[in-house]
Image (cartoon, rainbow, N blue to C red):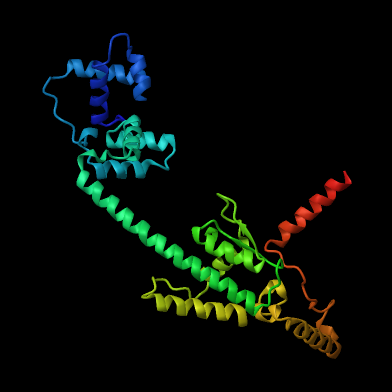
């Protein structure tokens, strides 16, 4: 049984018979990606057969709807060339037809024939732009108020901190920039096309999304979303004991309450070891305060070692 369907063979014969002058059967075989001798045999069988050849049962390429063409492109996108060629033979298609369909799907449609729809879409875009402008102004005002509140509560001195943010319009707006200038806070912005330029914020968002209680469905209201995020922030600051800072909460570390706690833990471990030394084969856990925290300590250490090696060369 031939690995090529009847539709493939008839389509190949039709294209070969309609080829222009100067084009050989071998060139057509290469273009159609079929064996040369098979194409010669198909031509011979066609000339010898009855003109009233029954139509094939396979669906021709011209009969594929837009949805079927899209599905065909999606089904063959990740296939190897061999698997794609076998798929085409099974469905009565050529590989160049899949390539043509893919190009057509990626080409934007001409909107000239639907002017009313275009006008409606343009008006919707304008309305969305006006809403975004109002929201950007509200976000800029909220950001400025938040910075002033933190500056007052934490008793920040001029020149003490740097505010690193993305390149959103509220963060680059004149209102927030003037506020930062008045308070002596230096602004810093993420680099374009660098997704991890604010790694501590990205790490916090990952912690939020990987919480066991992270909702599987969208929030029913803005109030519900704020309540959930408020509960997460409270847990993270006051209950979550972070391994990178010796299992104390961020709130304890921020208010310098961790030093006494770590000293107490060290005393408890030493007393337990003195009472039952057989349980320890070495020293107790190191409860010394970690002064500097790195998001990726192994990468930081590797970089430091590399820098020292370069200095010794």
Tally of numbered tags: 0
Where, quadrant-wise, is the N terminus in this rendering?
A: top left
Q: Which image quadrant is residue 277 in?
A: bottom right
188 and 64: which is toward the camera? 188
Q: Identify the residue at horizontal 35%, vertical 31% (top origin).
A: 95
> Visible in this render: residue 210?
no
Q: Is residue 265 above or below residue 129?
A: below
The residue drawn where x is 52% and y is 59% is: 173
Residue occupying the point 56% across, 54% down: 195
- Specify whether 230 is left or right of 5: right
Q: Residue 138: give x, y in percent of width and height.
A: 45, 68
Identify the residue at the far left of this view: 52
Vertical placement of 306 versus 80: above or below? below
**Residue depicted at 46% across the width and 80% down the height:** 227
Establish if 236 lies above or below 138.
below
Quarter of the image for residue 241 reads bottom right
Classify residue 150 as left or right of residue 108.
right
Q: Residue extending furthest right?
A: 312
Q: Position of residue 254 (x, y in %)?
A: 69, 78
Quadrant of the drawing holding the C terminus? top right
- Residue nearest the observer in this picture, 95 or 225: 225
Give the residue furthest to the top: 22
Q: Is residue 144 left or right of residue 41?
A: right
Image position, residue 57 (x, y; %): 18, 36
> In the image, 129: left or right of 249?
left
Q: Is residue 244 at least partly visible in the picture?
A: yes
Quarter of the image for residue 49 reads top left
Nearest the camera: 108 or 310? 108
């Amino acid at each position: 049984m031939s690995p090529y369907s009847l539709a493939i063979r008839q389509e190949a014969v039709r294209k070969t018979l309609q080829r222009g002058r100067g084009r050989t059967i071998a060139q057509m075989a290469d273009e159609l990606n079929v064996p040369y001798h098979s194409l010669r045999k198909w031509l011979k069988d066609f000339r010898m057969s009855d003109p009233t050849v029954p139509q094939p049962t396979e669906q021709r390429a011209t009969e594929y709807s837009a949805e079927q063409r899209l599905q065909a492109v999606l089904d063959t996108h990740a296939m190897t060339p061999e698997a794609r060629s076998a798929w085409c033979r099974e469905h009565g298609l050529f590989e160049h037809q899949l390539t043509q369909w893919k190009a057509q799907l990626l080409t934007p449609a001409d909107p000239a024939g639907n002017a009313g729809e275009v006008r409606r879409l343009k008006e919707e875009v304008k309305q969305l732009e006006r809403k975004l402008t109002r929201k950007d102004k509200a976000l800029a005002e909220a950001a400025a108020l938040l910075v002033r509140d933190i500056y007052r509560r934490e008793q920040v001195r001029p020149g003490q901190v740097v505010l690193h943010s993305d390149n959103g319009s509220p963060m680059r707006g004149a209102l927030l920039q003037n506020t930062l200038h008045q308070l002596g806070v230096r602004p810093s912005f993420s680099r374009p096309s660098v997704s991890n330029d604010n790694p501590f914020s990205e790490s916090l968002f990952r912690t939020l999304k990987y919480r066991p209680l992270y909702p599987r469905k969208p929030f029913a209201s803005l109030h519900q979303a704020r309540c959930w995020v408020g509960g997460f922030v409270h847990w993270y600051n006051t209950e979550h004991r972070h391994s990178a800072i010796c299992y104390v909460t961020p709130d304890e570390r921020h208010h310098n309450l961790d030093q006494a706690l770590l000293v107490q833990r060290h005393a408890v471990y030493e007393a337990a070891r003195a009472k039952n030394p057989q349980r320890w084969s070495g020293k107790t856990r190191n409860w010394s305060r970690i002064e500097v925290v790195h998001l990726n300590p192994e990468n930081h250490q590797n970089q430091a070692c590399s820098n020292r090696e370069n200095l010794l060369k």
